[in-house]
């Protein structure tokens, strides 16, 4: 059963919007582009797991992209996929690196050899163990004390785990092993009394508290004034649309597009903190008055009763 369906993570949408609107010479652009590449690759890897989830027993529930307030730190912690069962809960960390990977949990490192280059990363086995500690503390507040298990899946078809023959096996696999691993977890926890009611409380709490807000403005120290303003022309890929006679017309190629502002509003939504004012929307779309900005945004706005505090419902 899929309790929290997969969707494009807002963080990925924020990065895509930032790359569309950061000037080419902006100093933060290389770092944002690199982060977009890394995040897109991770999202693609998670979608490749979907095929293998179909082979899991019906009583298993899946939650994707769960971000919860940490009971240990003052921030939040994020998990790619949670697999819930009355006997146990499992955190699945999904990676999409290619090449030869050497995992070193004892030092917290992972070495990747790909196309003759060597790259270093944080060891995902340690990453997921840290999530486990936080989820355990979170679950205990709902009375759920059954085992919390972890596993890392590497989804790229060209990946190879470089481990010594005598090394302790690591909780790391390709996706094809998922159903066998779950079967093994069910056998190992068969003697543990199921905590059905506590699990329901935990699920309900996670669905209520899980957020997807992760603002790239803070991460890359950007403000809305760093971004290019205007409405895109999809024909000539320029911010050259102008509002004329209740439609948009490109000042460069002349094409008319009635709904051109929708993409501009989405970019504003992902790159501008809320609440916001209508003069900020007006500037973003290069309109001549605030009333036009409010009218164009109205179908997508949620207005708090009695105030001029807006947010989008994209
Ligand atoms: Zn154009």
Image (spheres, grey):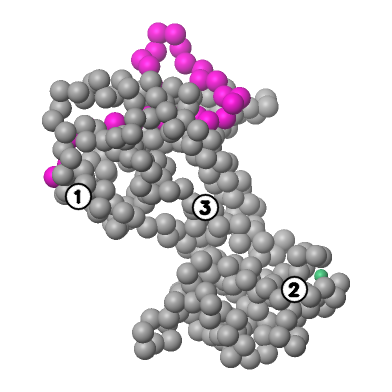
Q: Position of residue 178 (x, y in %)?
A: 41, 26
Q: Position of residue 151 (x, y in %)?
A: 37, 29
Please give left or right for residue 136 compared with residue 128 in the image.
left
Q: Secondary structure at mark 1?
A: helix
In the picture, the disc for residue 257 is: 2
Does 182 appear above or below 287? Answer: above
Badge 3: residue crowd in 10 Å (few <14, some 14–19, many ≥20): few
Task: Provide the residue designation for mark 3.
Answer: 8
Please give left or right for residue 262 compared with residue 86 in the image.
right
Badge 2: residue crowd in 10 Å (few <14, some 14–19, many ≥20): some
| 2 or 1: tag closer to the N-terminus | 1
**Residue lying furthest front:** 58
Residue 102 visible from this viewpoint: no
Does 85 appear above or below 262? Answer: above
Q: Is residue 149 magenta?
A: yes
Q: Residue at x 61, y 57 (%)?
A: 16
Tell me the magenta residue range. Answer: 143-170
Q: Nearer the viewer, residue 163 or 238?
A: 238
Q: Residue at x 50, y 33 (%)?
A: 51
| 3 or 2: tag closer to the N-terminus | 3
**Main secondary structure of the magenta stretch:** loop
- The reply to whether callout 3 and callout 1 are in contact (CB within 8 Å) is no
């Amino acid at each position: 059963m899929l309790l929290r369906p997969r969707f494009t993570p807002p963080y990925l949408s924020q990065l895509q919007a930032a790359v569309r609107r950061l000037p080419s010479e902006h100093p933060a652009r290389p770092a944002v582009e690199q982060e977009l590449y890394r995040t897109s690759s991770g999202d693609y890897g998670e979608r490749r797991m979907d095929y293998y989830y179909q082979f899991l027993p019906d009583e298993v529930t899946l939650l994707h992209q769960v971000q919860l307030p940490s009971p240990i730190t003052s921030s939040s912690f994020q998990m790619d996929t949670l697999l819930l069962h009355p006997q146990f809960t499992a955190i699945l960390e999904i990676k999409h690196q290619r090449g030869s990977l050497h995992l070193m949990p004892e030092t917290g490192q992972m070495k990747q050899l790909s196309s003759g280059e060597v790259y270093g990363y944080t060891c995902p086995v340690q990453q997921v163990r840290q999530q486990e500690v936080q989820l355990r503390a979170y679950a205990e507040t709902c009375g759920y004390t059954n085992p919390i298990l972890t596993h890392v899946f590497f989804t790229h078809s060209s990946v190879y785990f470089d481990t010594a023959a005598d090394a302790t096996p690591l909780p790391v696999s390709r996706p094809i092993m998922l159903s066998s691993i779950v079967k093994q977890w069910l056998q190992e926890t068969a003697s543990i009394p199921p905590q059905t009611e506590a699990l329901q409380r935990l699920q309900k709490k996670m669905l209520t508290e899980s957020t997807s807000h992760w603002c790239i403005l803070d991460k890359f120290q950007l403000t809305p004034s760093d971004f290019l303003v205007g409405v895109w022309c999809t024909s000539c890929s320029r911010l050259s649309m102008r509002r004329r006679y209740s439609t948009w017309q490109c000042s460069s190629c002349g094409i008319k597009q009635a709904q051109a502002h929708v993409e501009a509003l989405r970019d504003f939504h992902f790159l501008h903190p809320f609440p916001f004012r209508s003069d900020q929307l007006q500037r973003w779309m290069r309109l001549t008055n605030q009333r036009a900005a409010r009218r164009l945004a109205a179908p997508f706005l949620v207005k708090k009763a009695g105030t001029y505090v807006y947010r989008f419902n994209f």
